[in-house]
Image (cartoon, rainbow, N blue to C red):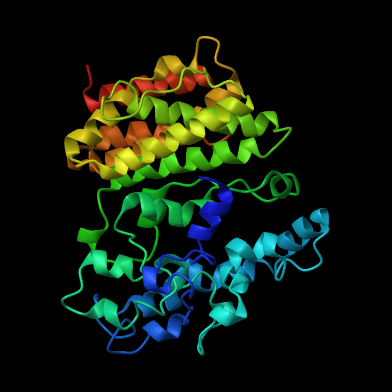
């Protein structure tokens, strides 16, 4: 899946349409967040009716993304790229103000570009499903057929978020845009909740799906760059290592391509396809605590992958991704979530993985062994 496809999925992102066959030639309109905001719908009190209020008052996505484009850092990045106004340039607004790209003929009466990343950015343009989605006889499949994005599906959810939370084009990075690191479970946990816990899915499963989708997008990005930097290659190698170690030798997942992760275009394409298969497979599994424990055990025993000739920058990128994965797996396992020894050992790993230039592979490997011991692994 290309970044362009992902950006269509993102922001309502903006261009994507999942509609009933009879409406295929009439793209649904975006009606605006206020169409969800009546007190009898999502603008009322109580956990099942306050979604609009949570988003508009507490969620980063409602105000901050477009506002960020007006700050000094965005101006500096824009100047480096020859962008006169980041608040109107599509290279910036595609993620920070995705509704700006909605064509006038698809804007409802209450549509507002200023809404930032709004309800419809994630759930899809609402014209064809807004009135019907509350019907008691409507199934989840009915809502999806009407154009409402199926965010209970972890693969769909990851695709909806990844392009703006992981992918930054090489020119933007070189101009000073910060690196992004997509982590579906952890970033979802940090969100003010406007969904029910039972529909959120297993956090460890969401983490793995998100990492595989992130690898797919990073691989695609590298196929588009004729001269990727060593830094970009090392980020790719670090994430690829993590996904491989999470699924290797598990028969449910597709076999890892035999490419040794060399930075060549054909290999980027092979990993792109493989990572998408891993993401779809992981999203379709029946996940359990045993599944999370198996991943945690496998990753906790990888200390040898940080020494023995592994280049320091590559080892640092592995550690950067690994500590976040260990955190999500531990958090989703009751026996470890409040275990002081495990949490202390994990904190030590986080400290050692904070700086790529200062990363000490030997120290990290020793700390990882201690973490493994704290888990009680043999």
Q: Residue at x 28, y 80 (%)?
A: 132
Residue in the picture at 63% in, 36% down: 223
Residue 75 appears in the rendering: yes
Left or right of residue 134: residue 107: right
Compare residues 110 and 303 and report the one nearer the observer: 110
Q: Is residue 73 above or below residue 24?
A: above
Q: Position of residue 275 (x, y in %)?
A: 44, 35
Where in the figure is residue 232, as x and y percent of width and height?
64, 34
**Residue ID at (58%, 73%):** 102
Number of dots carrying numbers: 0
What residue is shown at x 54% (from left), y 48% (from top)? 166
Up/down of 231 relative to 123, above or below: above
Residue 357 visible to an observer of this rendering: no
Which quadrant of the structure image shows residue 65?
bottom right
In this view, the residue in front, 364 or 296, is 296
Point out residue 128 in the picture as x, y percentages from the top left corner. Answer: 38, 78
How far across and how far down the image is residue 267, in percent?
Answer: 56, 25
């Amino acid at each position: 899946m290309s970044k362009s496809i992902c950006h269509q999925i993102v922001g309502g992102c903006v261009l994507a349409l999942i509609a009933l066959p009879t409406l295929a030639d009439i793209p649904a309109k975006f009606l605006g967040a206020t169409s969800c905001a009546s007190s009898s719908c999502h603008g009322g009190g109580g956990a099942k009716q306050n979604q609009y209020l949570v988003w508009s008052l507490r969620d980063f996505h409602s105000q901050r993304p477009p506002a960020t484009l007006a700050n000094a850092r965005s101006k500096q990045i824009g100047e480096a790229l020859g962008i006169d106004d980041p608040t109107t340039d599509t290279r910036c607004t595609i993620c920070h103000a995705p509704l700006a790209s909605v064509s006038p003929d698809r804007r409802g009466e209450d549509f507002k570009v200023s809404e930032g990343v709004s309800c419809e950015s994630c759930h899809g343009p609402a014209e064809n499903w807004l009135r019907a989605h509350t019907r008691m006889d409507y199934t989840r499949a009915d809502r999806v057929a009407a154009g409402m994005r199926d965010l209970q599906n972890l693969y769909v959810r990851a695709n909806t978020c990844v392009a703006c939370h992981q992918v930054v084009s090489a020119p933007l990075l070189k101009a000073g845009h910060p690196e992004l690191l997509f982590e579906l479970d952890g970033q979802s946990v940090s969100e003010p909740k406007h969904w029910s816990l039972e529909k959120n899915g297993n956090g460890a499963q969401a983490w793995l799906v998100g990492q595989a989708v992130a690898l797919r997008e990073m691989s695609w990005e590298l196929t588009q760059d004729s001269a990727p930097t060593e830094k970009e290659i090392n980020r790719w190698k670090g994430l690829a290592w993590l996904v491989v170690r999470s699924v290797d030798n598990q028969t449910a997942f597709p076999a890892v391509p035999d490419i040794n992760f060399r930075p060549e275009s054909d290999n980027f394409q092979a990993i792109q396809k493989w990572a998408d298969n891993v993401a779809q497979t992981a999203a379709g599994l029946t996940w359990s605590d045993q599944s999370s424990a198996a991943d945690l055990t496998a990753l906790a025993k990888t200390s040898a992958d940080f020494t023995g000739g592994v280049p320091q920058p590559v080892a640092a990128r592995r550690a950067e991704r690994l500590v976040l994965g260990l955190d999500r797996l531990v958090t989703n396992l009751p026996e470890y979530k409040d275990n002081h020894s495990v949490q202390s050992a994990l904190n030590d790993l986080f400290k050692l993985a904070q700086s790529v230039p200062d990363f000490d592979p030997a120290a990290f490997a020793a700390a990882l062994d201690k973490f493994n011991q704290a888990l009680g692994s043999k």
